[in-house]
Amino acid sequence: MRGSRLVWLAPLLLFAGVIILMAKNIGNSPEAIVRSHMVGKPVPEFAFAGSAGLPGLQTADLRSGQPVLVNLFASWCVPCAIEAPQLEELRRKGAPLVGLAIRDSNENITAFVGKHGNPFSRIGLDTNGVSMLALGASGVPETYVVDGRGVIRFQHIGEIRPEHVPVLLRELEKAR
Amino acid sequence: MKIWLIALLLIAAPAAAQLSTPDQPLADVQQEKVAKALMAELRCITCQNQNILDSTAPQAETMRAEVRQQIAAGRQPEEVRSYFIERYGDWVSFVPPAREDTLLLWGAPLLFLAIGLALVWRRFQR
Amino acid sequence: MSPEIGHFALWLAAGAALLQGIAPSIGLWRHDEGLVALARPAAVAQGLFTLVAFLVLMHAFYVSDFSVALVVENSHTMKPTMYRLTGVWANHEGSLLLWVLVMAFSGALVALAPSALGERFRARVLSVQGIVALGFFAFLLFASNPFARVWPAPTEGQGLNPLLQDPGLTFHPPLLYAGYVGLSVTFAYAVAGMLENVIGPRWAREARIPLAIAWAFLTLGITLGSWWAYYELGWGGWWFWDPVENASLMPWLAATALLHSIVVVMKRDALRAWTLLLSVAGFSLAMMGTFIVRSGVITSVHAFAVDPLRGVFLMVLMALYIGGALAIYAYAAGRVTEGKQFALVSRESTLVANNLLVTAMLGVVLIGTLYPMALEAMGGAQISVGPPYFNRVLVPMMLVMAVLMGIAPWIGWRRSATGHLSARLLPAGIAALAAVSIALWVLGVRGLGWILGFGASAWLAAASISILMKRGLTPGIIGMALAHLGVAVSILGATASGALQQEALVNMRVGDAIVLGPWRAELQDVRPVAGPNWTAIEAKIDVTRHGRPLAQLRPQTRTFIAPPMETTESARAGWRTGEVYMVLGKPDGEGRWQVHMWIKPLVRLIWWGGLLMAFGGVLALGDRVRLKRRAGQAAHRAAPALQGA
């Protein structure tokens, strides 16, 4: 019967394990952040017409030899308006920027860049949001660093806040 | 509650503003059935505990269209599933992968029954 | 009424809980009868004060007193009266207040109900209940005060999540809490039983009463929750294996296993240590469920707001109570001997088999719920464990279970012959074969799982009905047979509604019709309508079967004003025990509307089965009440002897 002492302790030990596990997760956001698994892989083929008077965007444009920031945005997206000044700052610091407008229309995009400024050299108008599947994006806005050979190097989820600007510039430099 | 409401507002507002087209079921009844069975096993990225079949989120709509398109093009459901896993990782499939790191998960029922039987056996030994 | 009265009453209730927790324990230790005797009045006082606090909060919601923060955050003057009242528990603080109210009530009941186990044991039980309640009062008062004020008071509230504005959700939380908290009584009985060393048939007979009631409430709560999800979420499903659903299922599974093992203690004085563990596990899992819903440790559609401080508080409570109980268990279970022996073929063995399967299912639900979190915490992959996993693993176990449930009641206690079984089970066997044949050749069902589902439900139903046909039935046997019949009915509903479901997703103009077999649904009209705090687009769809009109369905897409949110309101019409289920989708901009139609045969049996289970569970107590009266008389004579035990 000596050995069976441990049997009686087993439930307590098991419970302790569960508690430790939960303690580690406490205060986490209940929403899982699903990162793109396309980082390190080439951007799949796509081609979108231009918008707001700018040329459109296709995968070949991302293989220009220069690393580039690809920003997913939309006129209906509130955080996209919030990140506009940071995109402008990135542009001023010499970061090449292209945009992908998700589930949007030409008029709305034109109005949006008219109001919040246009940091992009190209805007692809993705009316169905299929580019999100191509990049493994989980929401809007998101920003990707794509290197000169068209390979995704970095993903930023959510709006770009002032503290993210140097991070993105650094990632852009790394992709060179 | 407050944080949650704000989150809801952020989700709800764009949903109302976005353009969307209703789903077009596949003409081939058998293919539509296969596509739906797969949709029921893919997890919506933006509304996290729903499958893309039930979800009304725009991204789920895009994903449904992608599933239908690939199934209509003659791809196998497992190939389509891999297409999504390649982009979003195992998270996107409600079926956990069968690998070493999920051995305990898939083995759980047998493990529990075995432990139980061992305890019962010990009792009858006495 | 001033909210301060409620706040004060809450403090008084907490004081009563403190007294109820501490005084009897010291009294029992110091042999001070006076302190021991404080337990009962303290429990009653705790119940009354908590009731006052609850009524004050309800009043604040009723009159829309926007000086109370909770009312501002969760109510709105435009809300219908009923939802203003139920808004009390449709939020974190209020639902916790409801939780302690039910807890205080159950304490008062234990204090007032007759007991066959003596005053000493009752004082011990009340003491444990007081200590458990104290933690929750502390949580309310320090981390979730429902009476917190806002100054200056706003003129309007922020409204209630529209999904929660629904009759089904009005009764879902109270039922579930009654179940959870009922399990706390069993928990207290187990802890007190270990401390007093009185685990045996008499203990089991009494502990079983709150257990069966708690189990029935849990069954009703889960049934109602499933029904609510079915008609409100608009996806046509009735169980989604969401972590929050699993959190309510786990205590139910533990209670189900316990309900069977406690009978073995009661009748044969065996399986004591195992029964104790289940008693502790039931309430522990209920607490863990509440914690999961409120702490945000797990992704879920139903989770409350995340507040790390509250999460930590609840986790500490949980660690103290569950850890404490399990520590007592580790210490005391060794001296609780396993009791009397039984043969391999015996009623005891079948109940052990039940426990084995139910506990394994519980383990699967637990591991499936926690696995993604554990894997990620250890730096592994981000995976999802969803319905496909749970269905694949649990459905086969459920089917084996159903087969055993048909056989077990025919097997006698201690050591049973098996010769009579084939004759007794003949009707069940015939029914199962008939069901499988009908499914295969009449209904054209394909898929092994579905066909076995039909067979298993017919088997179990016939076996349970043939018990009910016997003579000399006691309430206990009738209750058991009805509860088992309920399981069969639910399995039939789940199988038929899944295997025979038909669905159509069509973009239609006014005047178009969906035709599905004998069913025809014609879109008559789509127009805007207005409700008390929402506006909606409503479709009118005439449904006929074989040309005979059945109903006009009016599915809606509702837009709520406060808070702004869109919901889909499904429309359903019953047909025998099946349903036609319709959801109105989006317009395509060219005058067509997306309409989703399902035909779900026998789907209502899922919930009727749940009701039958709960009814059977309570009915089975009929025996206990009669026995208890006799035992109660015996206990008066036996009480002194018990104290020495």
Image (spheres, coloured by chain):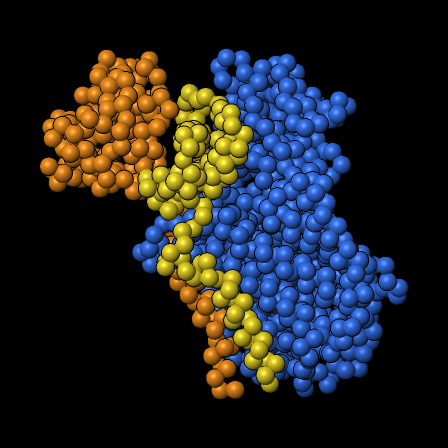
Q: Tell me the colour chain C is drawn in.
A: blue
Between C326 and C476, which is closer to the camera in this rendering? Answer: C476
What's the residue at 51%, 25% (across, down)?
Answer: B27
Q: Is residue C370 left or right of residue B86?
A: right
Q: Is residue C420 above or below residue C301?
A: below
Q: Which chain is orange?
A: A
Q: Quadrant of residue B42?
A: top left
Question: Residue C60 location in percent, x, y?
Answer: 59, 39
Q: Tell me the colour chain B is drawn in.
A: yellow
Which quadrant is the N terminus of chain C positioned in? Answer: top right
Q: Quadrant of residue C408?
A: bottom right
Q: Quadrant of residue C227?
A: top right
Question: Residue C273 location in percent, x, y?
Answer: 60, 76
What's the residue at 51%, 64% (across, down)?
Answer: B110
Residue C527 visible in the displayed image: no
Between A38 and C418, which is closer to the camera in this rendering? Answer: C418
Q: Is residue B115 left or right of residue A22?
A: right
